[in-house]
Image: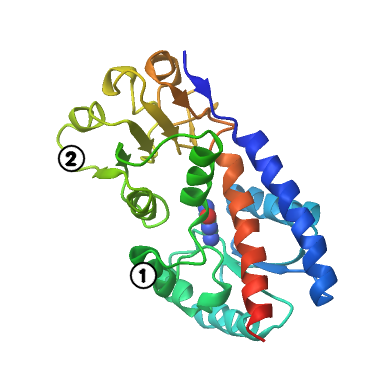
């Protein structure tokens, strides 16, 4: 039976630490870190994320600024808001909730955010910095996963790690972080002919495919660490991950549950990046 990696408890511990650091920050600079969250349209899942981000800001002691724009907002209007937020001294982190409506070029939006305020780490400058191992911000989900590995004392040096999924938000930066943590990294994706043949050799498997129950127990080796990034709904509408929990848990040494594993860490890492942005901007003044 695997040890359950508790993302909720780890997240609460980190948020507690951030709240303490925020008190220090306010004493030193006389203002609170500020996060601006922009949402375009009314995607229900996005609305929940945004609400939770605001709650986290309130809990830790940051200012939060929410911009809920109608779905018809033009790219030019959104770019103009970003320009305003880039210049706003009370805003230290800017996040445009993804996905944006299809008439807006998301890459253009990501590149318009000042890299120093890019708490998602989606700007090409920040992506490049991750590649060379000299970074201030890491995308929130991969950052949350490395925190969990550290918290549970899971050795990564010299271990083989397979990441399933090659998205810009999770798969690619995750692979790079594991490389920086001295793992031997393989990335599997939709064109990999036999994913199981690769994952069966891995000490650590990170599943970020977006397919419920994709990673089954017969695809992992005994004692593997299973990190499940999936947030899927099964046929009954229940939240479930990319790993088939019942079969993986029997063979794994550690496993993240869904919900309660990687999920709670994501917003916490956004909060960590926001404080970092505020500190770096304050020090640069
Ligand atoms: N939509 C789902 N996850 C994320 C995230 O981490 N950042 C942004 N900007 N949008 C998202």
Relative to 187, 208 lies left or right: right
Which numbered disc, 2 or 1, marks the residue that appears first in the sequence?
1
Give the image location of residue 101, x and y in percent.
49, 64
Give the image location of residue 200, x and y in percent.
24, 26
Q: The C terminus lies in which quarter of the figure?
A: bottom right
Q: Which residue is mark 1?
A: 128
Q: In this rendering, is residue 47 above or below 5? A: below
Measured in 3D between alpha carbons, the distance from the residue under mark 2 to the one under mark 1, in whole angstroms, is 26 Å
The disc at residue 192 is 2
Q: Where is residue 228, by image quadrant? A: top left
Q: In this rendering, is residue 103 above or below 6? A: below
Count numbered badges in the picture: 2
Q: Disc 2 on helix, strand or loop?
A: loop
Give the image location of residue 5, x and y in percent.
54, 29
Q: Nearer the viewer, mark 2 or mark 1?
A: 1
**The residue at label 2 has a CB less than 8 Å from ligand 1:** no
Q: Where is residue 199, by image quadrant? A: top left
Give the image location of residue 4, x and y in percent.
54, 24
The disc at residue 274 is none
| Visible residue check, residue 103 | no
Please name whichever residue, 157 or 52, is drawn nearer the observer in this view of the structure.
Answer: 157
* 10 Å crowding of disc 1: few (<14), some (14-19), many (20+): some
Relative to 61, 80 lies left or right: left
């Amino acid at each position: 039976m695997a040890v359950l990696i508790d993302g909720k408890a780890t997240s609460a511990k980190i948020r507690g630490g951030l709240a303490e650091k925020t008190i220090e920050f306010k004493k030193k600079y006389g203002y609170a870190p500020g996060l601006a969250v922009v949402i375009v349209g009314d995607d229900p899942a996005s609305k929940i994320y945004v609400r939770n981000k605001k709650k986290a800001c309130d809990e830790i002691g940051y200012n939060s600024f929410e911009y809920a724009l109608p779905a018809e907002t033009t790219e030019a209007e959104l770019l103009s808001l970003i320009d305003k937020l880039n210049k706003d001294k009370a805003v230290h982190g800017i996040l445009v909730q993804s996905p944006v409506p299809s008439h807006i070029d998301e890459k253009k939006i990501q590149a318009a955010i000042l890299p120093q305020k890019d708490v998602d780490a989606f700007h090409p400058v920040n992506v490049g910095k991750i590649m060379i191992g000299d970074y201030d911000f890491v995308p929130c989900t991969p950052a949350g996963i490395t925190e969990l590995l550290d918290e549970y004392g899971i050795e990564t040096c010299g271990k083989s790690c397979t990441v399933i999924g090659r998205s810009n938000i999770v798969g690619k930066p995750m692979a790079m972080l594991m490389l920086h943590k001295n793992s031997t990294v393989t990335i599997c994706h939709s064109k990999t002919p036999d994913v199981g043949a690769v994952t069966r050799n891995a000490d650590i498997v990170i599943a970020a495919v977006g397919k419920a129950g994709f990673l089954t127990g017969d695809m992992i080796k005994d004692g593997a660490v299973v990190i499940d990034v999936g947030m899927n709904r099964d046929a009954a509408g229940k939240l479930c991950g990319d790993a088939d929990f019942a079969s993986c848990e029997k063979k794994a040494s550690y496993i993240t549950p869904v919900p309660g594993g990687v999920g709670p860490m994501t917003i916490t890492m956004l909060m960590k990046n926001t404080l970092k942005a505020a500190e770096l901007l304050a020090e640069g003044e």
